[in-house]
Amino acid sequence: MARDELKLMEASIALAEELSFSRAARKLRVTQPTLTKYIAELEERLGLLLFERDRRTVVLTEKGRAYIAEARLAVLHGKRARQAARTAGGDVEAVLNIGRSPDIDPFLVSTLLSVRLQLHPHLKIELSSRLSSDLVHDVLAGSLDLAMVIDALESPLLSMLEISRSPFYITMPEHDPLAKRDSLTLEAMDGREWVLFERQEHPQLYDSILRTAVERQIVPTNVHHVMTAEDGNEFQLEDLLPSADAGPEAAYARNLLLDALEFEAASVNRRACPNR
């Protein structure tokens, strides 16, 4: 693969991911006119329109979608070929880039890090932590070899292996009457204040919670959003108590009896030849 061809592929992939010339240019660390020139040159070479654009929007065409899928594979294989060549002599450590969601059980992570492969004694694991949606994006882009994620959407470009399933839990202050129950139904949450993770944390789970509530005609009085479990507990204990004189309280967790709202942890990696 010629160097300039790889450069044009990387430019098209960045634009397909960002759908913005300015953001894609920043990502590639080039100027916006340079990126525009790359895309125009690529489309001229192919004789195809990969992107429909005007001053405000960029949209990937169907032909563009097909091209980007194969371009990602070409770039990924090029990177792996270079890495394989560098590590073939055994003197250089092979690097396995793995991403993990902050919600993955720490025991699974420590187990992974403890594994030693006899055939790859110099294998080095580089671990990073991001939101599940970002990790899937990185796997598809080739910057991660493997990711451990929560409730990832299936894709023909990905191989997925379920690691574990965990029930969905609801937390509340100890003074709450529901804290006396061993488990809860979603109906018990009707007409109450809800604290949910921001949608970007788990888009599929977030949508499933609200969709199930609508289907069952369960309506919260208000929905508050937080980014972490610690923020959620703090919010409950400080903002939802009946009075400031209530004193310090513990947060109780109760299992939600609803199979549709389980956490599925899975490992995902890129398929070598999707749809083939």
Image (cartoon, grey):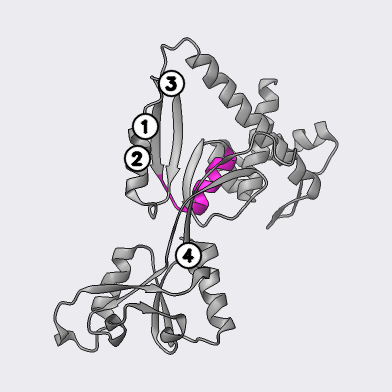
Give me the residue at 45% from left, 87% from top.
190
Mark 4: few/some/many CA within 10 Å (<14, 14-19, 20+): some
Q: Do the residues labelled 2 and 1 touch (CB within 8 Å)?
A: yes
Q: State the SS at label 1.
A: loop
The residue that mark 3 highlights is 120
The residue that mark 2 highlights is 111
Residue type for callout 1: Val
Image-quadrant location for residue 169: bottom left
Q: State the SS at label 3.
A: loop
Judged left or right of residue 266, residue 114 is left
Give me the residue at 24% from left, 77% from top.
237
Instruction: Pick whichever, 54 or 202, lies toward us.
Output: 202
Residue type for callout 3: His
Region in magenta? 129-141
Residue type for callout 2: Thr
Q: Which of marks 2 and 3 is nearer the N terminus?
A: 2
Residue 30 percent coordinates (x, y): 57, 36
**Residue 34, visible in the rendered structure:** no
Would you place residue 123 above or below residue 198 in this image?
above
The residue that mark 1 highlights is 115
Marks 4 and 1 sit apart, C-alpha to C-alpha, by 28 Å
The residue that mark 4 highlights is 262
Residue type for callout 4: Glu
Mark 2: few/some/many CA within 10 Å (<14, 14-19, 20+): few
